[in-house]
Image (cartoon, helix red, strand yellow):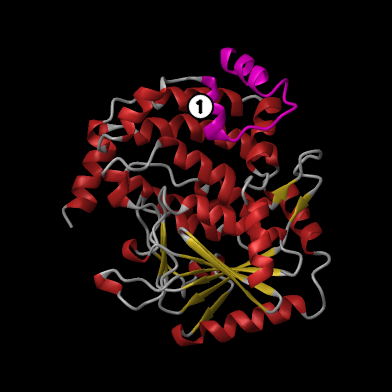
Amino acid sequence: MQALRTYDELTAARTRFLRVDELCRQAKLVPEEELAAEASRPLKGKKGVERAQGRFLAEILGNPVAGAHLCHAMLLPLPTSSARLKEYQARGELKLDGASIRRHGKASVITLSNPRYLNAEDETTLPGAETAVDVALLDPQTEVCVLRGDVVTHTKYAGRRLFGAGINLTHLYEGKIRYLWYIIRDLGLVNKLYRGLAVPDASPELQSTEKLWIAAVEGFAIGGHCQILLTMDYTIAAKDAYLTLPARKEGIIPGAANLRLPRFVGDRIARQAILAERRIDCDSAAGRLICDEIVAPDGMDDAIAAMVDRLTSSGVVSAAGNRRAFRAGEEPLDTFRRYMAIYAREQAECHLSPALVSNLERNWKQR
């Protein structure tokens, strides 16, 4: 109950919003000097002080009132997004760390970019990617949003466009990804893709800024990038692309995939993918349950343009209403909140477990 009392104090009885990182900072769960020392250690050398954050957030998210308020806080636009929106409206393009956004007619195309690491996600990419999502949703000229991966420079795939390789395992092993990264990502960036942007004075279930999302999968969507596909309205995949969720093999929980993937492929295939490393080729029976359209690798640009035209040719007035109606049956905010309460606690244990280090050394570092 102490966590709930602290939350009420810091949010003035839930009349002000605090994002997860600022909430934990103000709660003083761990002295700042200890967190700074922990951040400088490789994963195998961490002392586990971030577990206190996991316990704290799990208790808050486990409470229907406080948990819903925290989810609401994370669905609000970032404080810096308003200024970046003005830049985007003036120029029609914006480059951020980890992502860029460019207007193409009635669509805004967000390109996820970390070319050295196969467009993997890490601390350097998350703020920019979430800002790009905010800008696309806030921009009044944008009717449809497109999510795509950048061309990479990694030796093995140099010159190829890839959707993304999930979490940056190099940075994870080196201790450069903190525990809160997982929570900020899934309560913020990924949940905004699924639920849109909230407003301060209304429940996100009743009022939000939403647009239709198209994903363009080239090469592969691994881990976190596969998780993102489970929030999309329409997914176009290259014929030779594939999906995997190797988080169990690595030793972590794959975001909200455990909650969402069974809706797409059923419980058995979801368990095979998450627990037994099943690869899902996009051009397969299971892959087509996630991907709406399969195209030749050199036909992606035309496929995106055709889908944008199809979605916008007769207007998109009902898009937000239909998305909310789907969510009412699929995943109400309270269902997500309860899932995230478990996730916050269990991911802290996974992230700080010696098993994660040994899994990375056995399955990744040796390669």
Question: Number of marks in the image?
Answer: 1
**Residue 179's image quarter?**
top left
Q: Position of residue 145 (x, y in %)?
A: 64, 67
- At horizontal 41% and vertical 24% (from top left) the residue drawn is 32
- At horizontal 45% and vertical 83% (from top left) the residue drawn is 297
Left or right: where does residue 35 sit relative to residue 214? left
Q: Is residue 2 magenta?
A: yes
Q: Which residue is nearer to you in this view: 192 or 27?
A: 27
- At horizontal 25% and vertical 46% (from top left) the residue drawn is 360
**Residue 132's image quarter?**
bottom right
Q: Position of residue 222 (x, y in %)?
A: 40, 60
Q: Which residue is nearer to you in this view: 40 or 280?
A: 40
Mark 1 crowdedness (10 Å alpha carbons): few <14, some 14-19, many ≥20: few
Check the picture and name the quadrant holding the N terminus.
top right
Q: Is residue 244 above or below residue 187?
A: below
Q: Position of residue 300 (x, y in %)?
A: 52, 82
* Residue at image mark 1: 25
**Residue 302's image quarter?**
bottom right
Q: Residue furthest left?
A: 366
- At horizontal 65% and vertical 84% (from top left) the residue drawn is 306
Q: Which residue is nearer to you in this view: 253 or 305?
A: 305
Badge 1 marks a residue whose secondary structure is: helix
Q: Which residues are magenta?
A: 1-27
Q: What amino acid type is highlighted by mark number 1?
A: Arg
Work out whether residue 300 can be spotted: yes
Instruction: State the predominant SS element of the stretch in magenta.
Output: helix
Work out whether residue 265 can be spotted: no
Check the picture and name the quadrant holding the C terminus.
bottom left
Q: Position of residue 181 (x, y in %)?
A: 45, 41
